[in-house]
Image (spheres, rainbow, N blue to C red):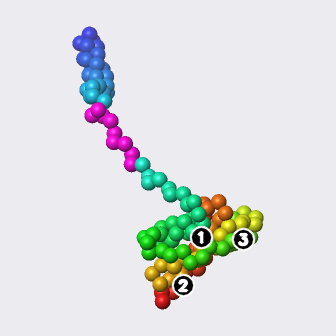
Amino acid sequence: MKQYFIYALILFALTLSACGGSTPPDTPAAQSAQPAAEQPAPQVRAETPHQAATLALQQQFGLKPEQIKVVSVDEGEWPDSCLGLPHPGESCAQTTTPGYVVTLEAEGRQYIYNVDQILTAARLAFASQQN
């Protein structure tokens, strides 16, 4: 019986030691440091209505600034916060929204953008066919 108890104790000790994890070796902080996450490119803030429309045209159609000509900038007003051009399923505040109608020309085409007064939104209202 005494021998059975000793075997049970040894088996118990082996089981406990197998469950315990080993401690990882100490590593210098420089080796364990993760690379810094890449920062997103800063957003360019438009300072004029034609700049807001030009930036939108560049982003939408991949054009370079030197390819874009400003034709006109006029005041505009729309019945909602979506500048009269809601996207499918988009909810727009029903409030009069002042802004600008900007006409641009690039690569033989004309583009008309509705731009809000604070220059944070520019929506394509019209794009002509290639001449």
Q: Quadrant of the N terminus?
A: top left
Q: Quadrant of residue 87?
A: bottom right
The percent position of residue 102, horizontal first and vertical second, equals 60, 73
Local packing at callout 2 (Cα closer than 10 Å; few below 14, some 14-19, many 20+) is few
Q: Which mark is residue 123?
A: 1
Q: Amino acid at mark 3?
A: Glu
Tag 3 residue? 77
Residue at image coords 50%, 56%:
43
Check disc 2 and give the amino acid type: Ser
Front-most of residues 77 and 69: 69
Q: Residue at 54% x, 66% y: name it.
A: 51
Indicate the secondary structure of the residue bearing disc 1.
strand
Dot 3 and dot 1 residues touching (CB under 8 Å):
no
Residue 76 image position (x, y, % from top left): 69, 72
What's the magenta region? 30-38
- Mark in front: 3 vs 1: 3
For this view, does 60 lie left or right of residue 17? right
Task: Say which amino acid is labelled 1.
Answer: Arg
Cα distance between the residues tagged 3 and 2 = 22 Å
Marks 3 and 1 sit apart, C-alpha to C-alpha, by 13 Å
Give residue 66's position: percent from left, percent from top.
Answer: 43, 72
